[in-house]
């Protein structure tokens, strides 16, 4: 598929807790789906530890390569929250107290029985010139520097931040997806599927076997931006399944 | 923490289906945990699309940087399964038919009503000189080239392959983990936690807030290889929580 007009994104997960296996990431599928709906294709994900050099290097590698970079994690008040410092270093900008972020936090803690102490004040630090991403859940905002969107790691907060960020993004053509399920083995459909793929170079065709409680099923997923081309390819794969003695089931209807 | 004696690993997920949001990865936490038990620390994860150049570049970046590289996905019989070709390119080795892999597949399909066609025969291709990783589930093996372990993406198959691979790995010190849970806000414990972290530089201390159905809880996770140092740090964090009016709960007892 030609990538000329593709609006692309990468996700950088700052996450010792993912790398230790303690926390199961729930953010990748949510971000992939929401960006997809906005016409932005997630092209790479990296998970790195809470180590300054690793974060800075990954930010600089990814922000130059994709239209947008999203980061999750490391923006809380504790000593292991170092993402804001790292983004500042990656851009060669000073880390400064963001007046509006500070104002929001002052007001939030005034209305609580919690002290707005020095560590909590760290949550108002952003690279100089950053714009804020609103956080309706726990107030401490995310922020944007150029094409880098810095969000919380807690899924509920990340989701709210992403919803606030998405209207500010410029998307491309929305990727449409269709799924055909059958119990034909991957190797049974493989040659015919290759032929369909060759006939429709603008459609991405993937084959995803699955062993469920009720036995083997294979999902053939077709993705593309042109609805007519996609429908034609779906018909070709459907006919292939039937020709091999299978019964194609529409995997998109719940 | 000094990384001198650390045995490290990276995971490369070859996965259009992860990047589209269709499939939720279940392999990261399993691999992280099993490697951790073997004294190998997962230090980076990358998810890349089923695109040759992306896979080759990621393999070469990661295999040089970590003790071991594990890959998941892209070793089936369909046209989108290109991992074996990519590993061969990354090492500058020819892709060859592995005689033992071929023999296993011949025998497997002889005992089935499925044809051992050309696309299925692709599953016997490995870079020249590769060793096999047994696959007791669906026979088609994974393989090892130098420090790169190539496994299936389907979790059940990947798990069986990893179990077969782990006895061949040389691990370092096993990372021990302890968790203390309380309802104290992150900002409330942050300054004291920083002080404990400064006192125990060999222990990694992380703070992971969580909004459960029953309200806010924060998990403080301490990790290190020295049991005595870890226990001392746990006591210090526990005392910190008590001094701030909280009640530390042992998060490791189920």
Image (spheres, coloured by chain):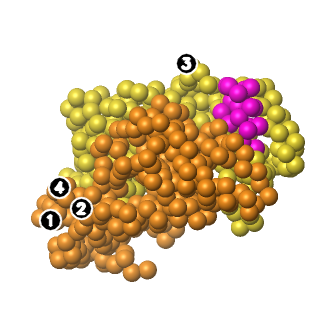
Chain colours: A orange, B yellow
**Residue B100 picture location, percent across and down:** 32, 37
**Foreground disc of the pair 2, 4:** 4
Residue A235 makes an appearance in the image: yes
Q: Which is closer to the viewer, label 1 or label 4?
A: 4
The segment highlighted magenta reads B189-205
Residue at label 2? A204
Q: Which mark is residue A89?
A: none
- Looking at the image, is mark 1 or mark 4 earlier in the sequence? 4
Subunit bearing disc 4? A
Residue B29, image x and y in percent? 55, 47
Task: Work out whether disc 3 and disc 4 sit on a shared chain.
Answer: no
- Of the numbered discs 2 and 4, the one sitting upstream in the chain is 4
Q: Secondary structure at mark 3?
A: loop
SS for callout 2: strand
Crowdedness near tag 1: few (<14), some (14–19) or many (≥20) residues, C-alpha within 10 Å = some
Give the labeled residue for mark 3.
B4
Q: Quadrant of residue A33?
A: bottom left
Distance between the alpha carbons at the discs numbered 3 and 1:
51 Å
Disc 4 marks which residue? A4
| Depth order, front residue of A72/B103 | A72
Q: Are marks 3 and 2 in contact (CB under 8 Å)?
A: no
What is the spatial separation of the Cα atoms under label 1 and label 4, in whole angstroms?
18 Å
- The image shows residue A141, relative to residue A122, as above or below, that is below
Q: Inspect this view and state whether residue B23 appears.
A: no
Q: Nearer the viewer, mark 3 or mark 4?
A: 4
């Amino acid at each position: 598929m030609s990538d000329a007009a593709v609006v692309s994104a990468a996700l950088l997960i700052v996450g010792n807790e993912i790398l230790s296996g303690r926390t199961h990431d729930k953010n990748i599928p949510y971000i992939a789906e929401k960006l997809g709906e906005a016409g932005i294709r997630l092209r790479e994900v990296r998970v790195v530890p809470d180590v300054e050099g690793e974060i800075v290097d990954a930010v600089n590698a990814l922000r130059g390569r994709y239209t947008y970079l999203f980061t999750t994690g490391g923006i809380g008040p504790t000593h292991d929250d170092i993402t804001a410092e790292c983004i500042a270093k990656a851009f060669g900008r000073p880390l400064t107290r963001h007046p509006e972020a500070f104002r929001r936090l002052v007001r939030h803690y005034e209305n609580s029985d919690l002290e707005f102490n020095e560590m909590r004040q760290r949550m108002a630090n952003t690279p100089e010139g950053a714009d804020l991403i609103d956080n309706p859940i726990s107030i401490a905002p995310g922020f944007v520097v150029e094409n880098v969107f810095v969000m919380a790691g807690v899924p509920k907060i990340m989701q709210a931040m992403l919803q606030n960020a998405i209207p500010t993004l410029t998307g491309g053509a929305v990727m449409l997806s269709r799924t055909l399920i059958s119990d034909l083995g991957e190797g049974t459909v493989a040659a015919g599927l290759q032929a369909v793929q060759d006939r429709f170079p603008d459609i991405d065709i993937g084959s995803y076997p699955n062993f469920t409680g009720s036995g083997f099923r294979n999902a053939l997923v077709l993705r593309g931006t042109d609805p007519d081309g996609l429908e034609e390819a779906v018909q070709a794969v459907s006919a292939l399944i039937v020709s091999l003695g299978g019964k194609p089931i529409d995997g998109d209807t719940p």
